[in-house]
Image (tube, rainbow, N blue to C red):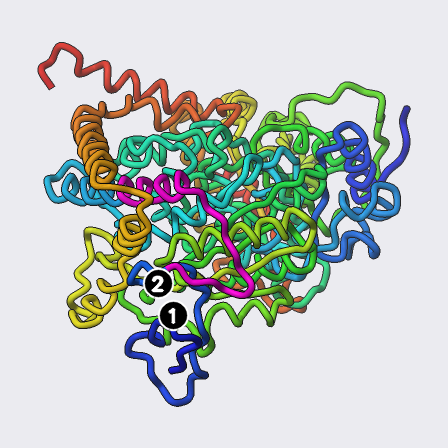
């Protein structure tokens, strides 16, 4: 059954399915119940599933994650909403020292099937702490898995797969793309969650992106085509674990690779990917792997975010540079 | 300082904290004085049989012996570190023995006495301090969660677990352990807010042993700790943490209230850490010997022994038998520790995830191949 959905609505429907499938799924967060969340991702769920399953929590992120750990120990599957990316840090201690480590510490006796939903990234003209890209902190933490969706289809299936998964997952939602639409076949069989995907074929350069930057990369590929350049675009989809085999296959053909993300470039995902591509595809590379990302500054006031964020032109500029080697 | 009755000894205010701006220290709930006199309390009665009394004494002696042996093993290089419970035996045995089937304990890293009451093998605790694992016991089967080293983090886990109990309609409770230092942690305060807002069946059991490593209580609080509970909207009670009967009575009552849907209680067990924070610590740098001497007079075991002897509940043969059992336990701990094998290298990798990732599996394979490359080379 196909219907046209925004990313936001696809997440809402996916959460509804997950709650119908498993009575142990409990949603927790600030303003997610009566209000339906500041982005309305949980709209209507408290009305249908009750206050015990869609919990309006006190306003404290560590409390949300810490009590989620206890609920998971009792056999529940908590899905925590962090209202904005910049507010995850009060919960950082619980996520890194507890959520990520308890499976290992307990030798597998205490699984932590917790999903941490975070609207992330900039481009919405917000005040500070509402536009950040914290994925590298979590991808650097053993015990966590990190995914970033870019489209309604992945949003719909990905949130259900994440909720059903036995390990803790940081689930990153591209907030500025919440209103992007696509047709979602809710009767289809989804592909695996932890897999990257070639979303546009090409021969000259491989461009890698995830979350909100996938659309930007596709726009850049379109513009490059007008100039006669064939750009392949890979949606990474999973940040930890990275699924780089399709990337290696692509780079072995193109010989050139550009990684795009909103997060600051230094020690971002691009650095790890560049190292791995270089290790694995060294003899195929015609140029060094280039990174396009945010600058190493705090996320700027919104009047400057267009300069800060990678856009079509900055991606094309990197494509030009790898082609010029 | 006030004395509430002729038979109840009131422990001093926080040693060294007799500042005029601090409110007067309250009385303690006490059922057994340091001299071994059984006293009554208007709110907390306890009816213990002779056998239960003897069992409590046995618990106290055995966990102290375990603790002494572990400290010695650390000094001899067999353990990396040891966090001693010396002086806190009554608080831990009293709280642990108050737990019923279905209740779950969430310890810090010093609750060896509670571990004992949950049937955890001492060697499974020792293995953590030897560096073999992060605690070898099964937290589900023992209803005794793994030790938590990040101060106070377990209070939120206990509260979340209690919220799960609520949803399951289970008539059980969670017991969160914390220390006086932990009361300053934001997460502990968040746990109390959650517990109050959701009326969760959780009891916060704070062993106020007067020091957070070197920092005395008055740096953590300007009011007696148990009074904090009022600000969160649930009862707080201060109990003589060196009186196993009073701790048992107070904790039983709090757990019963939680199970009945009356929400959380904060218990401040007023006690003293007789030893160092851990074997890496030197308490002579921050506290006076006279303070230690004063607390020795309130020893949690001596008072039980005095009461047992005076009331005729136990005789010399009983005390001798407990000593012999303690000697056997110490021997078993020593032998088990020294003979404890190191874990295999692959133990690092195999439980990071419920579903191991391909990149980690590749790292594990690299590790195994690298290790195998030394086989037969004499390394």
Residue A251 in the image, given as x and y percentages of width and height: 51, 26
Between label 2 and label 1, give the one nearer the viewer: 1
Residue B40 is a magenta residue = yes
Query: Compared with residue B220, is residue A253 higher up or lower down, i.e. above or below?
Result: above
Question: Residue at left 19%, top 33%?
Answer: B324
Q: Left of B372 or right of it: where is A161?
A: right
User: Where, by quadrant of the figure, is residue A198 drawn?
Assistant: top right
State whether residue A252 appears in this view: yes
Residue A221 in the image, given as x and y percentages of width and height: 67, 37
Question: Residue at left 11%, top 19%?
Answer: B379
Check disc 2 and report the residue beneath it: B33
Specify start and end residues of the magenta stretch as a single range.
Answer: B38-63
Q: Is label 2 in contact with label 1 (beta carbons under 8 Å)?
A: yes
Check disc 1 and report the residue beneath it: B7
Q: Do the residues at discs 2 and 1 belong to one chain?
A: yes
Gap in Å between the C-alphas at discs 2 and 1?
A: 8 Å
Chain under callout 2: B
State the residue lying farthest toward the bottom.
B20
Residue B149 in the image, given as x and y percentages of width and height: 38, 49
Q: Nearer the viewer, residue B26 or A275?
A: B26
Q: Nearer the viewer, residue A99 or A158?
A: A99
Question: Quadrant location of the C terminus of chain A?
Answer: top left
Number of residues whose C-alpha sits closer than 10 Å to that of mark 1, classed few (under 14), some (14–19) or many (20 or more): some
Number of residues whose C-alpha sits closer than 10 Å to that of mark 2, classed few (under 14), some (14–19) or many (20 or more): many
Label 1: state its secondary structure: loop
Chain under callout 1: B
Question: Residue at left 70%, top 32%?
Answer: A158
Label 2: state its secondary structure: loop
Q: Nearer the viewer, residue B68 or A44?
A: B68
Question: Residue at left 29%, top 42%?
Answer: B314
Residue A181 in the image, given as x and y percentages of width and height: 84, 40
State whether residue A97 appears in this view: no
């Amino acid at each position: 059954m196909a219907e046209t959905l925004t990313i936001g609505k696809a997440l809402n429907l996916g959460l509804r399915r997950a709650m119908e499938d498993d009575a142990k799924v409990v949603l927790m967060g600030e303003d997610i119940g009566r209000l339906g969340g500041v982005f309305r991702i949980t709209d209507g769920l408290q009305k249908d599933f009750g206050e015990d399953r869609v919990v309006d929590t006190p306003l404290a992120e560590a409390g949300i994650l810490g009590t989620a750990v206890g609920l998971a120990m009792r056999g529940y599957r908590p899905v925590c909403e962090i209202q904005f990316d910049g507010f995850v840090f009060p919960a950082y201690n619980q996520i890194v020292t507890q959520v990520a480590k308890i499976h290992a510490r307990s030798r597998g006796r205490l699984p932590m099937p917790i999903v941490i939903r975070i609207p992330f990234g900039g481009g919405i003209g917000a005040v500070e702490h509402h536009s950040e890209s914290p994925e590298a902190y979590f991808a650097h933490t053993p015990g966590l898995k990190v995914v970033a969706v870019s489209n309604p289809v992945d949003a719909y299936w990905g949130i259900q797969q994440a909720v059903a998964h036995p390990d803790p997952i940081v689930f990153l939602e591209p907030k500025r793309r919440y209103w992007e639409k696509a047709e979602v076949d809710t009767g289809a069989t989804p592909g695996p969650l932890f897999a990257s995907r070639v979303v546009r074929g090409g021969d000259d350069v491989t461009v890698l992106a995830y979350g909100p930057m996938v659309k930007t990369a596709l726009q850049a590929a379109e513009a490059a085509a007008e100039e006669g350049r064939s750009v392949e675009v890979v949606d990474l989809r999973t940040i930890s674990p990275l699924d780089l085999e399709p990337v290696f296959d692509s780079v072995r053909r193109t010989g050139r690779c550009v990684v795009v993300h909103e997060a600051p470039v230094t020690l971002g995902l691009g650095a790890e990917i560049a190292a791995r591509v270089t290790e694995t595809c060294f003899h195929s590379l015609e140029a060094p792997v280039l990174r396009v990302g945010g600058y190493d500054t705090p996320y700027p006031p919104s009047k400057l975010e267009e300069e800060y964020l990678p856009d079509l032109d900055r991606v094309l500029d990197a494509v030009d540079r790898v082609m010029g080697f | 300082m006030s004395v509430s009755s002729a038979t109840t000894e009131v422990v001093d205010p926080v040693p060294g904290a007799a500042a005029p701006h601090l409110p007067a220290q309250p009385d303690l709930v006490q059922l057994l004085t340091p001299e071994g006199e059984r006293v009554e309390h208007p709110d907390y009665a306890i009816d213990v049989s002779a056998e239960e009394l003897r069992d409590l004494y046995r618990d106290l002696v055995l966990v102290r012996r375990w603790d002494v042996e572990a400290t010695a093993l650390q000094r001899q290089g067999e353990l990396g570190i040891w966090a001693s419970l010396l002086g806190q035996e009554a608080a831990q045995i009293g709280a642990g023995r108050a737990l019923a089937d279905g209740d779950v304990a969430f310890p810090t890293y010093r609750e060896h006495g509670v571990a004992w009451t949950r049937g955890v093998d001492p060697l499974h605790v020792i293995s953590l301090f030897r560096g073999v694992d992060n605690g070898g016991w099964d937290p589900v089967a023992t209803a005794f969660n793994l030790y938590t080293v990040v101060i106070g983090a377990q209070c939120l886990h206990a509260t979340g677990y209690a919220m799960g109990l609520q949803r399951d309609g289970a008539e059980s409770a969670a017991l969160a352990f914390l220390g006086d230092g932990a009361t300053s942690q934001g997460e502990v305060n968040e746990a109390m807010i959650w517990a109050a807002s959701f009326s969760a069946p959780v009891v916060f059991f704070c062993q106020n042993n007067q020091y957070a490593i070197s920092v005395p209580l008055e740096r953590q609080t300007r009011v007696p700790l148990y009074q904090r509970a009022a600000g969160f909207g649930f009862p707080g009670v201060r109990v003589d943490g060196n009186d196993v009967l009073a701790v048992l009575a107070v904790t039983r009552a709090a757990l019963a209230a939680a199970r009945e849907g009356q929400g959380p209680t904060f218990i401040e067990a007023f006690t003293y850490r007789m030893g160092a924070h851990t074997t890496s610590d030197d308490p002579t740098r921050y506290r006076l010997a006279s303070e230690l001497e004063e607390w020795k007079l309130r020893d949690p075991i001596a008072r039980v022994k005095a009461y047992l002897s005076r009331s005729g509940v136990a005789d010399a043969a009983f005390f001798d038998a407990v000593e012999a059992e303690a000697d056997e336990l110490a021997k078993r701990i020593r032998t088990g520790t020294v003979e404890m094998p190191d874990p295999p290298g692959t133990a690092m990798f195999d439980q990071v995830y419920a579903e191991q990732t391909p990149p980690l599996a590749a790292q594990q394979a690299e590790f195994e191949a690298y290790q195998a490359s030394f086989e037969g080379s004499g390394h």
